[in-house]
Image: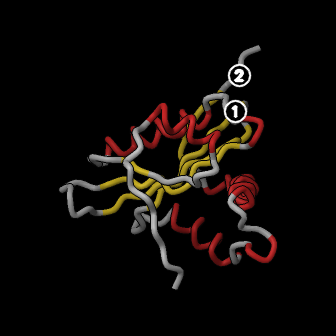
Amino acid sequence: MSISLAVRPLQSSDFSVWSVLWDGYNQFYGRSGADALAPEITRTCWARFFDPDEPVWALVAECDGFLIGFAHYLFHRSTTLIGPTCYLQDLYTVEAARGQGVGRLLVEAVYARAREAGAGRVYWQTHETNLTAMRLYDSVAERSGFLVYRKIL
């Protein structure tokens, strides 16, 4: 039996399935219950993917017609490069697909889009406890050595 796995751009007709994946992603990072994202954030995020004035993009992984993962990425300026920089903001696969190469395909698809856009770099961050993802990341990129600091305003 052959499995058909593909990565493609998100389509407006994908909302109902994407939103289930989005909820799973946010639950994975503890954004659920009282800490859940406001529905307005999800609606705005979704709208940005289809707004030509926004630098935010989305790809989905599809297996035999079912969405099983996504990658959200954006382009921005940098003070150290002339061309754009690509930030891979969100990467998620359903639990059953983890370790099956889906995340790698999504990362490689983002790399391809970044090259097409003239980006000189793709970067991302993950939580220090996300060991499963870090095994993949260590095989497709190098750790920069930088730590992330933030201040919630």
Q: Amino acid at mark 1?
A: Cys
**What is the secondary structure assignment of the residue under circle 1?**
strand
Q: Report the residue at 20% width, 58% height from top.
A: 80
**Lower position in the chain sequence, tag 2 or tag 1:** 2
Figure check: 129 above or below 102? below
Q: Which residue is mark 1?
A: 63
Residue 146: quadrant of the picture: bottom left
Q: Position of residue 82 (x, y in %)?
A: 18, 56
Tell me if mark 2 has few (under 14), some (14-19) or many (20+) residues whose alpha carbon lies within 10 angstroms of its own. few
> On the rendered structure, is 97 left or right of 89?
right
Residue 97's place in the image compared with 117, above or below, is: above
Does 144 appear above or below 112?
below
Residue appearing at x 67%, y 43% in the figure? 93
Specify the color scheme.
secondary structure
Q: Nearer the viewer, residue 6 or 129?
A: 129
Q: Is residue 11 left or right of residue 122?
A: right
Q: Is residue 44 above or below residue 115?
A: below
- Tag shown at residue 3: 2
Q: Amino acid at mark 2?
A: Ile
Question: Do the numbered discs 2 and 1 sit on residues whose CB atoms are within 8 Å?
Answer: yes
Q: Is 129 on the left or on the right of 50, as rendered?
A: right
